[in-house]
Image: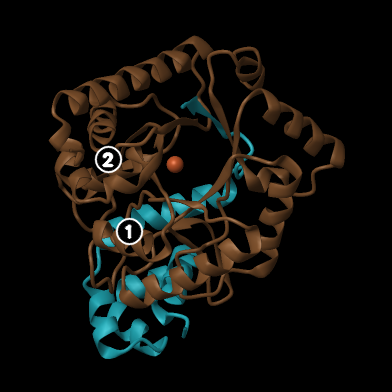
Chain colours: A cyan, B brown
Amino acid sequence: MRPSRVEAFLAKLYTDEDFLGKFLREPEILSRKEGLTGTEAKEMAGMDLTGLGFAADSFKHKRRGRGGKGRKRFGIL
Amino acid sequence: MTGGILSNLDKIDVLEMVAENFQGSSKGRLRSFKTLGSEVPLILHGVSMGLASTYPVETKRLEGMARLMEALRPETWSEHLSFVRAGGIEIGHLAAPPRTFENIQGSLENLGRAARVVGCRPALENIATLVQPPVSTMDEPTWVGGILEGSDCPFLLDLHNLYANALNIGEDPLEYLERFHLDRVQMVHLSGGRWISNPQAPEPGARRWLDDHLHDVPDPVFKLLEVVARRTAGSLTIILERDGNYPSFESLLGQLELARRAVQAGVDHRNSSPEMAGVS
Ligand SMILES: [Fe+2]
């Protein structure tokens, strides 16, 4: 299995604010520069940019948070 | 809150423990949780393996889970259908990968190794996502179904994650639910969330439903639970997730009671119309 370049590209978008900024300015050009194919780059440029902003914010918040320490999970059978 | 759980074990049938919280635990701490497991069944829940990926799962994470399974002897373990790292970058949380055949293939390879190293298959949980993963070639129900069928893993259906994803793609949650492999559901997660908005978003007025585990379970999620109980022939383990902003423990037990009623309503409906559950 060859690791997906798109997964790596998304991981960078979700964690590197400068990279995200560059992507929002020139999504297709940056995607090509990072090794995505022409089709992948086009799809990246057409992605849900509003959702991307929400997701990147949420990941940043989670990374700053306290991880799983406060979690309480219990239930019924 | 932990005190509330321990003093109400007679009203709680099962505890789900986040596996990563045991990292570096002393033998004494592990022993005390194993003892707790003799009073109430435990389930170990992983949050950082990143099994749904074309990147191979790290062996040390699988071995860590195997050691915990040995130390705590839980009923079973579960993990998410997500990637959490790629290309040497840690995202720090559960992310939805591009839903492709390659990703299904990578996930199945990871799940095969996970089952071999840990000793049994995990239940697989659908995640909430605020962004639709780009470069996908299939929708979420098809992708989840492909991994469940290929791996033969049980389905841990997080109904609030499903509810959030349906709202965020503009689908009716009940119709969205019907597109998943409900026959494979063995466990259910329930939690709550809220609307978030971003004035700077490219789409003015855009909002998304955030799965924050800080709010009560919304009423429509109990309706989804009733449908799941109607569709599944086996028993269901229902877990309430809460990560903060805690109400009184009575209020949390009240939500478990609502869950019991929803399951009962689904079972009653199934028994009154057996063809709905595929039972002859
Ligand atoms: Fe969950």
Query: Percent x, y for residue B120?
Result: 57, 55
Side of B82 relative to B131 (left or right):
right
Q: Which picture quadrant has residue B209?
A: top left
**Dot 1 crowding, Cα within 10 Å, few <14, some 14–19, many 20+:** many
Dot 2: element? helix
Task: Please report the residue visible at 37 percent of the width from the left and 63 percent of the height from the top.
Answer: B147
Check residue B163 in the rendering and tell me which mark sits there, or answer none: 2
- Name the quadrant containing residue A33: bottom left
| Nearer to the camera, B88 or B162 | B162
Depth check, front residue: A18 or B112? B112
Mark 1 vs mark 2: give the one in front.
1
Residue B73, image x and y in percent?
Answer: 69, 41
Asked if residue A63 is positioned above or below residue B9 in the image, the reply reads: below
Three-letter code, disc 2: Tyr
Give the residue displayed 17% in from the left and 32% down from the top.
Answer: B274
Question: Could you tell whether B38 is left or right of A27 in the image?
Answer: right
Mark 2 and mark 1 in contact (Cβ < 8 Å)?
A: no
Image coords of residue B110 (percent x, y): 52, 69
On the same chain: label 1 and label 2?
yes
Q: Nearer the viewer, residue A11 or A21?
A: A11
Vertical placement of A42 versus B66: above or below?
below
Indicate left or right for A3 with B98 as reference. Answer: right
Q: Position of residue B131 (x, y in %)?
A: 31, 57
Vertical placement of residue B257 versus B99, above or below? above
A45 on left or right of B152: left
When asked about the image quadrant of residue B75, the answer is top right
Q: Which residue is at 47% across, 83% downward?
A: A1
Whether residue B208 is visible, yes or no, is yes
Question: What's under tag 1, amino acid-wise?
Answer: Val
